[in-house]
Image (cartoon, grey):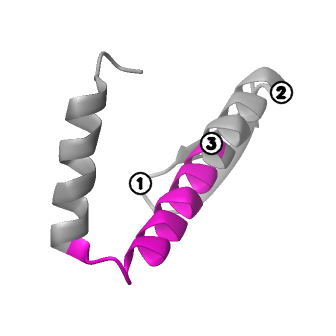
Amino acid sequence: MFGLGTQELLIILVLVMIVFGAGKLPQVGGALGKGLRNFKKGVNETDAEIEEGTVEEITKDGEDDKKDV
């Protein structure tokens, strides 16, 4: 897993426990999971827009114009 061994993972886990504390770990994990989920959703939406050929341009007026490519 990313070239990290067991010792490196244990050291990282201990450092995270020291920084955040044991009580905050579920909150940190939940926030990280939500962030990753939103990132994947954004990437998939962008891929879908590219496949559909829908491009959104921003004009100098600040108005959004959608064009089909």
The vertical placement of 39 against 21, above or below, is above
Can you identify the residue that label 1 sits on? 60
The three-letter amino acid code for the residue at tag 1 is Lys
Residue at 54% of width from left, 68% of height from top? 30
Per the rendered image, the range of residues in magenta is 20-40
Left or right placement of residue 21 versus residue 51 in this view = left
The residue mark sitting in front, 3 or 2, is 3
**Of callouts 3 and 2, the N-terminal one:** 3
Query: In front: mark 1 or mark 2?
Result: 2
Asked whether the residues under the numbered discs 3 and 1 touch, taking CB atoms below 8 Å apart as contact, a structural biologist would say no
Residue 25 in picture, x, y percent from top left: 40, 72
Q: Earlier in the sequence, mark 3 or mark 1?
A: 3
Q: Amino acid at mark 3?
A: Lys
Where residue 40 is drawn, which disc sits there?
A: 3
Residue 5 place in picture, x, y as percent: 28, 23
Give the numbered dot on residue 38: none
31 shown above or below 49: below
